[in-house]
Image (tube, helix red, strand yellow):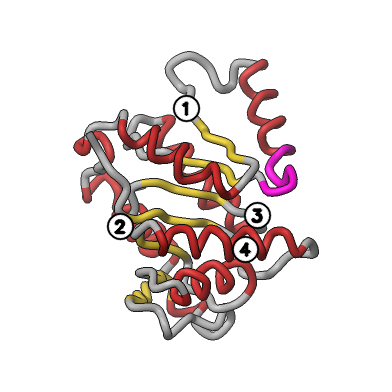
Amino acid sequence: MSKIRKICVYCGSGPGTDPAYVEAARALGAHLAQTGIGLVYGGGGDGIMGALAHAALDHGGAVTGIIPEFLTQREHALRGAQELIVTRDMHERKRLMFEKADAFVALPGGVGTLEELVEQLTWVQLGRHKKPILLANIKGFWDPLCALLEHMKMLQFIRAGLDFNLLVADKVADILPMLQAATARVPEEAKQMDRVAAERL
């Protein structure tokens, strides 16, 4: 049976217009720290990313930030994290985030957050790994994406053999129980991806 040691959280480098998003990030960061689960995230110090990481650190949690060199100034890389990895490019960043995490959560964010999330869904769809993926659907933020995915299923662009299990939690308190239940059903070897295969994706 697998267990969760670290969770990768995708989220915005800005705060958004609704304070509920930052509040949810802070609550998740604190909860990860309090349960002894490490945070892997994009390495920024501002916006939802910063709120998440600062909350984890403030509650004694372990934080790994992974950021490409060209974004260290723009996203104000969080130097206070126990581990800050500066990568050559976005691809290396995403590969390392994948390798270091046992599960993935998408908080509200922009195009970058969406791209990271969709890439993970694609990898699951193509059978590259079985790590659980969850949408933190704070105040219905991800409802439009969920509707689009259902539309794709209805039109059979997502069909038998290409389906995936995407978890959706409306409250921060539900995130870890849902991920832990899903992770327990995944053999440890099914979470891994061959290094060469990851490099080629």
Q: Residue at x 68, y 38 (%)?
A: 145
Relative horizontal placement of residue 58, taking residue 18 as reference (left or right): left
Disc 4 from disc 2: Cα separation: 20 Å
Query: Looking at the image, do the residues carrying marks 4 and 3 touch, with CB atoms under 8 Å apart?
Result: yes
Relative horizontal placement of residue 134, taking residue 132 as reference (left or right): right
Q: Position of residue 139 (x, y in %)?
A: 74, 47
Q: Earlier in the sequence, mark 3 or mark 2?
A: 2
- The secondary element bearing badge 3 is classed as loop
Q: Label 2: which residue?
A: 100
Of residue 190 and residue 24, the one placed in the foreground of this image is: 24
Most frequent secondary structure within the magenta stretch: helix
Q: Label 4: which residue?
A: 12
Picture quadrant of residue 127: top left
Mark 1: which amino acid? Phe
**In the drawing, what numbered circle is on residue 164?**
1
Q: Is residue 64 visible?
A: no
Q: Which portion, as a residue range, is magenta?
A: 138-143
Mark 3: which amino acid? Pro
Q: Position of residue 40 (x, y in %)?
A: 40, 62
User: Does 149 sit above or below residue 57?
Assistant: above
